[in-house]
Image (cartoon, rainbow, N blue to C red):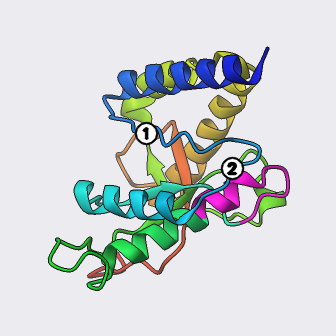
């Protein structure tokens, strides 16, 4: 398969998954293996932050020896978030607040120095999530992998909310916080 065919197939897969999830997607088309971002890309992403005003941001792990594009993606994301917060960037425009940034679970967490500190119950939306996963036609080998990970994180989440909880958690996702989280209480 040629590079352009792979690129087109991945784009179709991503759009199909976004449609299932009810999400909008904006493609930057800056390459893959290698991905390189110039200052125009940085500013374009900062503008997206300002336009969207996200409540939170998801990206790759800070380390990934198997995918050099992944750390680049999160570093670009962090820098764009900071630029979008800066009063000096396009003065007079509404700045973005400080949305928390989370890295989602990489394929090999141990190799990426990734440790979850947030577990999100996705039991109610698992069927939709699995349908979106199945859009990765070129990576069918990951469908069962992600199912096993979601089940394992579900067990961990259930255990972490306590035995007396009435919540029925079967599937969960793990995230690693990049910045400290702010809360009103520890309960």
The residue indicated by pointer 1 is 122
Residue 72 within the magenta-colored segment of the rendering: yes
Q: Position of residue 172 (x, y in %)?
A: 51, 43
Q: Is residue 162 visible?
A: no
Q: Say left or right for 176 vs 85.
A: right
Question: Closer to us: mark 1 or mark 2?
Answer: 2
Residue 116 within the magenta-colored segment of the rendering: no
Magenta part of the protein: which range?
A: 63-74
Q: Position of residue 174 (x, y in %)?
A: 56, 53
The residue at 54%/55% (across/down) is 59
Q: Is residue 181 visible?
A: yes
Quadrant into which the N terminus falls: top right
The alpha-carbon separation of the residues under discs 1 and 2 comes to 31 Å
The residue indicated by pointer 2 is 35
Mark 1 or mark 2: name the one nearer the start of the chain.
Answer: 2
Callout count: 2
Q: Position of residue 25 (x, y in %)?
A: 39, 36
């Amino acid at each position: 398969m040629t590079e352009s065919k792979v690129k087109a197939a991945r784009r179709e897969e991503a759009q199909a998954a976004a449609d299932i999830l009810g999400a909008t997607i904006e493609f930057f088309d800056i390459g893959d293996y290698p991905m390189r971002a110039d200052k125009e890309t940085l500013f374009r992403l900062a503008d997206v932050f300002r336009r969207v005003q996200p409540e939170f941001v998801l990206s790759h792990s800070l380390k990934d020896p198997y995918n050099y594009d992944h750390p680049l993606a999160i570093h670009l994301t962090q820098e764009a978030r900071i630029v979008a917060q800066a009063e000096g960037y396009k003065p007079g425009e509404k700045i973005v607040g400080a949305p928390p940034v989370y890295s989602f679970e990489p394929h090999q967490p141990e190799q990426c120095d990734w440790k979850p500190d947030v577990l999100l119950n996705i039991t109610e939306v698992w069927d939709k999530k699995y349908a979106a996963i199945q859009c990765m036609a070129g990576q069918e080998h990951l469908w069962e992998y992600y199912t096993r990970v979601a089940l394992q994180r579900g067990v961990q989440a259930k255990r972490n909310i306590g035995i007396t909880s009435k919540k029925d958690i079967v599937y969960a996702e793990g995230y690693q916080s990049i910045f400290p989280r702010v809360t009103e209480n520890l309960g």
